[in-house]
Amino acid sequence: MKNALKSHSLRLFRSNSDIQGFYKEHIRFNDSVDKRSKVNLAVIDDEPFAPQTNLSSYGYKITPLGDIKNIHELESFSIVLCDIIGVGRYFDKSTQGASIISEIK
């Protein structure tokens, strides 16, 4: 069985360059996952963040924050995703999430 599997595997690659290409592609994928795991995403939203499961499966670290009280809560995050409606009541109730975005900017 082991020899049959090895023989089948070798037929997938017709040359050394095929093997090198596969290896480089595999390493690139692992590098992408490693890079994603270093990205800290903050989500400011008053509702559950639907894409969280999908993004987490790609290796991103996502932290749902709800509505924040202080802009300094975001200092440790590389990327901030902010809802527009239903958040920002501690900044400016009339502009809501836009007030948080303005503060970040």
Image (tube, rainbow, N blue to C red):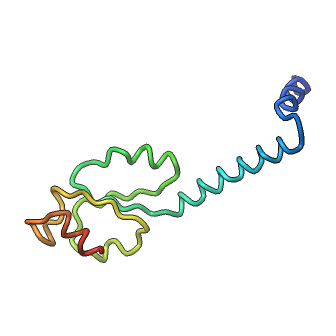
* Residue 80 point in image, percent of width and height: 35, 64
| Quarter residue 14 falls in | top right
Check the image and report above or below for 14 versus 96: above
* Residue 42 point in image, percent of width and height: 36, 62
Check the image and report above or below for 10 versus 18: above
> Which residue shows up at 41% across the image and 72% down it?
76
Check the image and report above or below for 102 versus 41: below
- Residue closest to the far left: 94
* Residue 52 point in image, percent of width and height: 39, 48
* Residue 17 point in image, percent of width and height: 85, 45
| Quarter residue 70 falls in | bottom left
Where the C terminus falls, by quadrant? bottom left
Check the image and report above or below for 29 versus 44: above
| Quarter residue 9 falls in | top right
Q: Give the number of callouts.
A: 0
> Which residue shows up at 18% across the image and 61% down it?
87
Q: Nearer the viewer, residue 70 or 22?
A: 22
Q: Which of 95 and 59 is in front in this view?
A: 95
> Which residue shows up at 41% across the image and 61% down it?
41
> Which residue shows up at 71% across the image and 52% down it?
27
| 15 lies left or right of 43 | right
Where the N terminus falls, by quadrant? top right
Q: Which of 1 and 30 is in front in this view?
A: 30
